[in-house]
């Protein structure tokens, strides 16, 4: 098992890999491979439930996905997302929400932004809950940001993201996701911080990378942002398998003799 201190010690030594997972069977495949960490992202609301943003994710949804992933993931390090508003309704509510994710099998939680929930981050860390920050494009604020746009492209925004990153480190976050920021900013923040940065659309110089599993498997030919590399043409390959199954059923070539009981 890779532990939190080991993840932190990877900074400057080697890159850290992370992938999202929402279910048990894909977690089992990831667990059998070399990827360092799993993120049970609130992107589950979009990828698994068909919503058009992460806002409909709830704590019950995240607990369900986290426990399913834990059952497949062995002792892989799992980070689970605190969903929309679950850390903005006061300390007690935030602690209860984080506690549910940890009891469902997470090793750490992730939350977006910092302003207004500094005390919550500090309290969770002091309670023994490892916290990963998330800056740049923060999808739970999609309406305020006016869409899923690259952040930190002007000096003022870049300065703000840099100072928020330092603040999260001071508050005790063990790591930080940087989403959709210019590569130069990803590099500068990664050099400035002592905790590892995990980038998604933040260039090659962050300390690690994270991708949404279904995106990197090419499960949607329509979703092709600049930062995404599709490592498989999943939509085509799965589509072909489904069509093959359908045609074999209709041609009575499935099941064959060897696939039938006597
Ligand atoms: O929910 C998610 O999948 C995420 C990643 C995009 C980092 O937060």
Image (tube, rainbow, N blue to C red):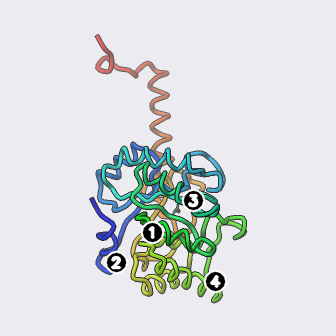
Residue shown at 57%/67% (left/top)? 112
- List x then y, in percent, for residue 170: 47, 81
Q: Choose between 1 and 19: the one closer to the eye.
A: 1
**Residue 153 lies in quadrant:** bottom right
Q: Earlier in the sequence, mark 3 or mark 2?
A: 2
Q: Give the Cα separation between the discs numbered 1 and 2.
A: 20 Å
**Residue 54 lies in quadrant:** bottom right
Answer yes or no: is residue 217 visible: no
Residue shown at 50%/57% (left/top)? 98
- List x then y, in percent, for residue 135: 55, 73
Q: Give the Cα separation between the discs numbered 3 and 2.
A: 33 Å
Q: Give the Cα separation between the discs numbered 1 and 3.
A: 14 Å
The numbered dot on residue 125 is 1
- List x then y, in percent, for residue 6: 29, 70
The numbered dot on residue 92 is 3
Q: Give the Cα separation between the discs numbered 4 and 1.
A: 27 Å
Q: Earlier in the sequence, mark 1 or mark 3?
A: 3
Q: Choose between 78 and 48: the one closer to the eye.
A: 78
Q: Earlier in the sequence, mark 3 or mark 4?
A: 3
Label 2: which residue?
A: 11
Q: Residues within 10 Å of mark 1 (few under 14, many from 20)?
A: some
The numbered dot on residue 157 is 4
Q: Earlier in the sequence, mark 2 or mark 4?
A: 2
Q: Choose between 157 and 254: the one closer to the eye.
A: 157
Q: Is mark 1 within 8 Å of ligand 1?
A: no
**Residue 155 lies in quadrant:** bottom right
Q: Which residue is outermost to the front? A: 92
- List x then y, in percent, for residue 152: 61, 81
The reply to whether discs 4 and 1 touch (Cβ–Cβ < 8 Å) is: no
Residue shown at 44%/71% (left/top)? 198
Q: Residues within 10 Å of mark 4 (few under 14, many from 20)?
A: few
The reply to whether discs 1 and 3 touch (Cβ–Cβ < 8 Å) is: no
């Amino acid at each position: 098992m890779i532990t939190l201190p080991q993840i932190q010690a990877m900074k400057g030594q080697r890159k850290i890999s992370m992938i999202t997972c929402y279910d048990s069977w894909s977690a089992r495949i990831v667990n059998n491979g070399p990827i360092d960490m799993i993120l049970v992202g609130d992107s589950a609301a979009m990828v698994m439930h068909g919503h058009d943003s992460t806002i409909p994710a709830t704590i019950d949804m995240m607990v369900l996905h986290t426990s399913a992933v834990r059952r497949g993931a062995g002792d892989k390090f799992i980070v689970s997302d605190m969903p929309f508003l679950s850390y903005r309704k006061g300390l007690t509510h935030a602690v209860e929400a984080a506690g549910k994710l940890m009891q469902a099998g997470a090793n750490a939680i992730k939350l977006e932004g910092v302003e207004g929930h500094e005390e919550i981050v500090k309290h969770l860390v002091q309670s023994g809950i490892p916290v990963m920050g998330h800056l740049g494009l923060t999808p739970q604020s999609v309406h305020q940001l006016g869409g899923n746009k690259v952040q930190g492209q002007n000096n003022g925004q870049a300065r703000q993201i840099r100072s928020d990153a330092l603040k999260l480190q001071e508050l005790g976050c063990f790591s930080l996701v940087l989403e959709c920021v210019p590569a130069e900013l990803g590099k500068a923040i990664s050099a400035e911080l002592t905790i590892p940065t995990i980038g998604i659309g933040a260039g090659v110089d962050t300390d690690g990378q994270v991708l949404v599993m279904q995106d990197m498997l090419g499960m949607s030919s329509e979703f092709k942002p600049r930062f995404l590399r599709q490592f498989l043409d999943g939509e085509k390959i799965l589509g072909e398998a489904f069509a093959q199954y359908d045609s074999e059923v209709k041609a009575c070539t499935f099941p064959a003799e060897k696939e039938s009981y006597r």
